[in-house]
Amino acid sequence: MSGLKILNWLPWWFKYIGGVLMFSGLVATYYFIFLSIKPEWLQFNVFTVYSKYLDTTTFSFINNNQGDEIAVFCYLAGFLVFLFSSNRKQSEFKSLLKVKALINTIVLSVILFITIYFFIHGMPVLYLVVLISYSIPLMFVIIYLFMQLTKQNSFEK
C-alpha cells in the first residue's frame, strides 16, 4: 500500500469546490441542452476538428455557442476535483479504497456501455455516450460508499 503515497491528493476542502462545479454543470446541462437556451454572450469562434450541421466542416474555425461545452466541462472537471480531493483524515486504507472504487467504476461503465450498445442503434448511441459519461461520477460515489461501508464493517468485526 505504500505505493499510494505517490498520489498527491488535493486538500479535503476541494470536495466542496468539486461539488459546486458538478452541481453547476448539471444545472447548466439542463439549461443549455434540455431547454436549448443559447445565450448570445456564449457565441464564440472556436477551432473544430469536425463539425456537421448544415455543412460539414473540418479543421477550421466555426461560430458556435459554447454553453453545452461549458456545462459538460464543469460537471466532469468538478468530478475530477471531487475524486482527487482527500478526506479530512486520509488514511492509506481510504486512499486504496478510492483507487479500487475508481477501477471498479471504469470496469463497470465499460461493461455497461458494451452491453447496452448491442441493443441500441443509430442516434440513441450518442445519448448513451452522454448518459454513461454523466453517470460515471454517480457510479463512483455509490461504489466508493459501498466499499467503504462493507470494508469498514469487516474491519470492525
Image: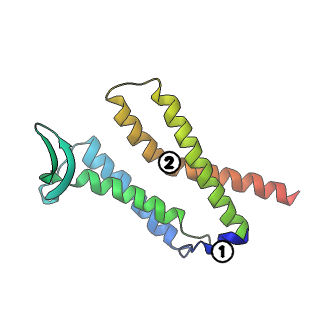
* Residue 114: x %, y % from top left: 50, 33
Please tell me which residue lies in front, 63 or 39.
63
Quadrant holding the C terminus: bottom right
Residue furthest to the front: 59
Q: Amino acid at mark 1?
A: Lys
**Residue to which mark 1 is pinned:** 5
Q: Look at discs 1 and 2 and give the one toward the viewer.
A: 1
* Residue 59: x %, y % from top left: 17, 52
Residue drawn at x 57%, y 53% is 141
Please tell me which residue lies in front, 64 or 78.
64
Q: Is residue 105 left or right of residue 97?
A: left
Please, is residue 132 above or below residue 121 in the view?
below
* Residue 22: x %, y % from top left: 42, 58
Residue drawn at x 63%, y 60% is 98
Residue drawn at x 76%, y 51% is 150
Quadrant holding the N terminus: bottom right
Give the mark, 1 or 2, whose residue is nearer the N terminus: 1
* Residue 35: x %, y % from top left: 25, 42
Q: Is residue 18 left or right of residue 7?
A: left
Between marks 1 and 2, how big is the CA–CA gap? 25 Å
| Residue 124 occupies quadrant | top left
Please tell me which residue lies in front, 120 or 74.
120
Tell me if mark 2 has few (under 14), some (14-19) or many (20+) residues whose alpha carbon lies within 10 angstroms of its own: some
Q: Are marks 1 and 2 in contact (CB under 8 Å)?
A: no
Q: Amino acid at mark 2?
A: Ile
**Residue to which mark 2 is pinned:** 136
Under circle 2, the secondary element is: helix
Tell me if mark 1 has few (under 14), some (14-19) or many (20+) residues whose alpha carbon lies within 10 angstroms of its own: few
Residue furthest to the right: 157
Please tell me which residue lies in front, 152 or 106.
106
Under circle 1, the secondary element is: helix
In the rendered picture of this protein, how many numbered marks are placed on residues? Answer: 2
